[in-house]
Amino acid sequence: MADSNQLPGASHLECMGTGERVESEQLIGLSRVGKPLFARYDLDAIADRFTPELVACRSADLWRYEEVLPVRNRAAQIKLGEGWSPMIDAHRTAARLGVRKLWIKDEGQNPTGSFKDRGLCLAVSRALELGAEELALPSAGNAGSAAAAYGAAAGLPVHVVVPTDTPAPILQEMAALGADVQLIEGLISDCGKIVKAGVEKHGWFDLSTLKEPYRVEGKKTMGYELREQLGGRLPDAIVYPTGGGTGMIGMWKAFDEMERLGWIGSERPKMFTVQAAGCAPMVRAWESGAEHAETWEGASTYASGLRVPGAVGDFLILRALRESGGGAVAVPDHLMAEWVLRLGADTGIFAAPEGGATAAAVPILLEKGMITPDDEVVLFNTGSGLKYVGSTPLD
Ligand SMILES: *Cc1c(COP(=O)(O)O)cnc(C)c1O
C-alpha cells in the first residue's frame, strides 16, 4: 500500500435478511428489504499480519483494531479518546452476589460518558469519509450527545430528536456540543418519525441504530477488548443492558471475526440481555421463544437507554442469546437504583441505571440457574451515573 494513511476497510456489506452482497463504498442505510447491513472484511487476507501481538502496542482507543473497522482513510478517523475502557475487578460485589469472579467494563469513561461514543465515532467517521453533509438521529439521550460530539469534531451539523423527559444533564451536553436539539412529547420511536421526515425533506443522513451499517462496528470493539483485557480469553457470561441491541449484536459479531482470525476458538460466553420491567420487549420475545419482538406499549423506565419499545435488530439479538446459551431478564427501576448505590460503594464506579440493572440481574440469573457461582461474569456499565443526576427514583 503506497499511501500510509490507507487501510483495507470492508470488502463489502451483507444484508442480514437475505445475505445479499452490497457495495460498501457508498452512503447507505438499510438494505433493499429493510434489514440491517453488516460490514464484512477479508479476514483471511489480513490474518497473518493483524495479530494480537501487533495490537498490544497500539494506542489506548478503539482504533487499535483499525484493520477490522470500515474507515479506509486514517484522515477520516475522528478521535476523542473512545474505547479501551477499563475492566474493573469488582471483588466485593462478586462476594456480595456470590459469583467467583466479577468484572465491570466501565463504559462510563468514554468521551461523552457512555458507550454510545463507540458506535457514533465509527458512524460519523464513515459518514464524513463517504461525503455526508448533515447528520440526524432520534435518541433516548446518550446517542444524541455522542453524535453531537463526533459531529462537532468532524465539522458536520447534527440534528437530534429526543423525548422531553431525557435527563437534563444530557440535554445540556447536546446543546453545549452544538447540536440542533428538538424535544418531542413521546418515545424514541416517535422521535424516529420526525427524523425520517427530515431525511426526506432535507437530505439528512440518518444515524439511527442499525439503520446505517457502522454503529455496530464501533460497538463490536467491546468484544475485541474483552478478549485482550482478559489476557486472550473470553469470560463465561456477559450481562448487558439491552435497548436497540447494537452492543450485544456487535460483540457477537466480534467473536465470529476473532475466531476467523484465529484469536479465539469456537467457545463463546453466555450472553444475557437485561431490560427494564417497564420496557422489556426482548425478554418477552425470549420467554415466548419468538424470532422477533412485538413492540412494547406504554414503555416506562428511568433508564433512558432501555426505553426502546422496538428494535430493527430484534432477530439478531434473540439469535445471539439463543446461540450462546444465554437469556433475557427484566428488573424493576427501584432495583436498578439500589444496585447503583451498592456498586458505587463497593467499587468506586458511579454507574448509570443501565449498569445498575446488570448487577440487579445477577441474583435472578443465579436463582434461575442461568449462571452458576463458579462463573466468571462481566457486567457492562454502559454509562456514567452523572448523566442521570436529577432523574433517579431515589432522588
Ligand atoms: C443506549 C444505551 C443502552 C442500550 O444499548 P444498545 O446497545 O442500544 O442495546 C444501554 N445503556 C446506556 C447507558 C445507553 O445509553
Image: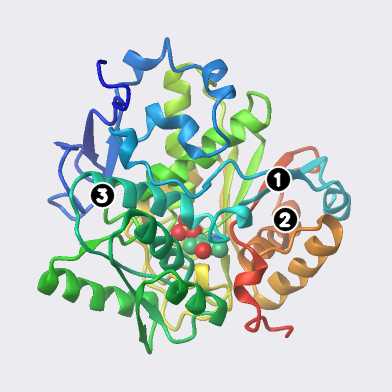
Q: Residues within 10 Å of mark 1 (few under 14, many from 20)?
A: many
Residue positioned 65% across, 32% down in the render: 229
Please report whichever mark, 2 or 3, sits nearer to the chain's N-terminal start.
Answer: 3
Q: Which residue is mark 2?
A: 362
Instruction: Name the amino acid type tagged 3.
Output: Leu
Mark 2 → mark 1, Cα distance in angstroms: 8 Å
Q: Residues within 10 Å of mark 2 (few under 14, many from 20)?
A: many
Marks 2 and 1: which is nearer the front? 2
Colour pattern of the rendering? rainbow
Residue positioned 88% across, 51% down in the render: 92
User: In x, y percent, where is residue 133?
Assistant: 19, 59
Mark 1 → mark 3, Cα distance in angstroms: 43 Å
Quadrant of res 365? bottom right
Q: Is residue 303 left or right of residue 311?
A: right
Q: Is residue 128 visible?
A: yes
Give the camera-side residue of 121 and 278. Answer: 121
Residue positioned 60% across, 61% down in the render: 383
Quadrant of res 193? bottom left
User: CB of residue at label 3: within 8 Å of ligand 1?
Assistant: no
Element carrying mark 3:
helix
Q: Is residue 274 left or right of residue 78?
A: right
The answer to whether 219 is drawn above or below residue 340 in the figure is above
Q: Disc 1 vs disc 3: Cβ atoms closer than 8 Å?
A: no
Give the camera-side residue of 34 and 340. Answer: 340
Q: Disc 2 vs disc 1: Cβ atoms closer than 8 Å?
A: yes
Q: Which residue is mark 1?
A: 371
Marks 2 and 3: which is nearer the front? 3
Q: Is residue 362 left or right of residue 74?
A: right
